[in-house]
Image (tube, grey):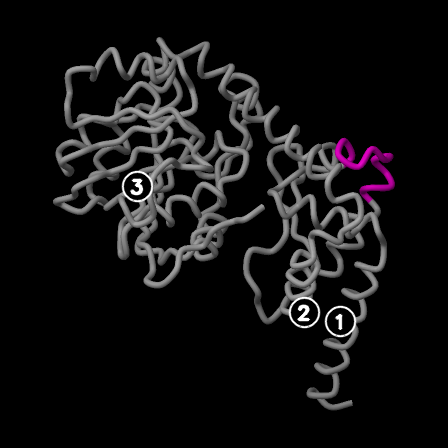
Amino acid sequence: MTTIEKTKAMQAKAILNALKSVSDETRIRIINILSFGSFNVNEITEVLGMGQSRISRHLKILHDAGILQSHREGTWVYYKLPEESTSANEFAFDINQLILSHKEDLPHREIDQQKVAILLKNREDKSNRYFNKVGKNWDRIQEEVLNPDIYRNQILSFIPAKSETILDLGCGPGGLFPYLLKKSKQVIGIDSSEKMLEEARKTFSTQKRVKIVEAPLENLPFKANSADAVVASMVLHHISNPPLVLQEANRVLKNKGSLCIVDLKKHDKEFMRDTYADLWLGFNPDLLTEWLRAANFEVKEIIEQETHSYFKIIAIKATKKGGHHVRNNN
């Protein structure tokens, strides 16, 4: 058998495996569930109301066929649908797109989506309870983990010299506002924690160039193409669905607008989940890059920075590409 014949045989086998993997109703339901974000086996089991061993078997079949991907977060393995089509997963990616283009016809769609919505709301509520509890002490808590001064100058270096409007996503009590005002006529801080924003309003109530908005980062209350720059500083690891936040950042940014992300590099410190309400144990640069490209960003620069603690920092500068923004209609 020639090399070309072997390649064709392997492609045919991959196509056959992909088709077989989606021939089961439960696996179709799993694909629909994962269209809303990354979930671990316990969460998928909770939505489907089936035994964990049964769900694990279905996940393995889909994973082996390239229909879904997995990544480890400490002791948990999370599953997700591929963000992009590649030469290795092209057919599997197309199958997912075909299935999800007929959502109205999917089995148990409504009840599954209702349960997913409850699951995501529980994640959000847990995070908000934590931040509402620690709002008054957040600056001190941040310094205990990682002094913000380490990365604030990096944020400023990624932002254009003169901006009309900068959005600070997950602004908390506004620790970054004085720095961002050096680069922009107006800074808008957005957070979903009422108590955090109470502290921000106390400090910046007389600052006319600062606007404070309570809203979910996954659904920003701003018009498309309205901001010059967006900053997401140490916030994505608290977000249930970071890709959706990046899509929203792309939507509100002007063409060629700048996005600055600063976050923790992937680590294995499980205590961060319970102590600081972290949903993600940091990120690999490759994963963030994948999400950014899928959200119509061009990655310009990635910097990894050592710190005085066991955490490392990732700083990413990206710009919005021309053309239409990507919007998740789930």
Q: Quadrant of residue 7?
A: bottom right
Element under disc 1: helix
Residue drawn at x 35%, y 9% is: 136
Residue type at the position of mark 3: Val
Which span of residues is magenta-colored? 45-56
Image coordinates of residue 178 in percent, x first then y, are: 18, 26
| Secondary structure mostly taken by the magenta-highlighted segment of the chain | helix
Of residues 304 and 92, the one nearer the viewer is 92
Q: Residues within 10 Å of mark 2 (few under 14, many from 20)?
A: some
Vertically, is 4 above or below 99?
A: below
Sequence-wise, the earlier of marks 2 and 3 is 2
Sequence-wise, the earlier of marks 3 and 1 is 1
Q: Quadrant of residue 90?
A: bottom right
Alpha-carbon span between mark 2 and mark 3: 35 Å
Alpha-carbon span between mark 3 and mark 1: 41 Å
Q: Quadrant of residue 86?
A: bottom right
Residue type at the position of mark 2: Phe
Q: Residues within 10 Å of mark 1 (few under 14, many from 20)?
A: some
**Residue 46 within the segment the image draws in magenta:** yes
In the picture of the structure, the residue carrying the numbered disc 3 is 230
Residue type at the position of mark 1: Ile
> Can residue 28 be seen?
yes
Q: Nearer the viewer, mark 3 or mark 1?
A: 3
Count of marks overlaid on the render: 3
Element under disc 3: strand
In the picture of the structure, the residue carrying the numbered disc 2 is 91
Residue drawn at x 16%, y 42% is: 164
Q: Residues within 10 Å of mark 3 (few under 14, many from 20)?
A: many
Image coordinates of residue 144 in percent, x first then y, are: 37, 16
Q: Are marks 2 and 1 in contact (CB under 8 Å)?
A: yes
Image quarter in which the N terminus is found: bottom right
In the picture of the structure, the residue carrying the numbered disc 1 is 15
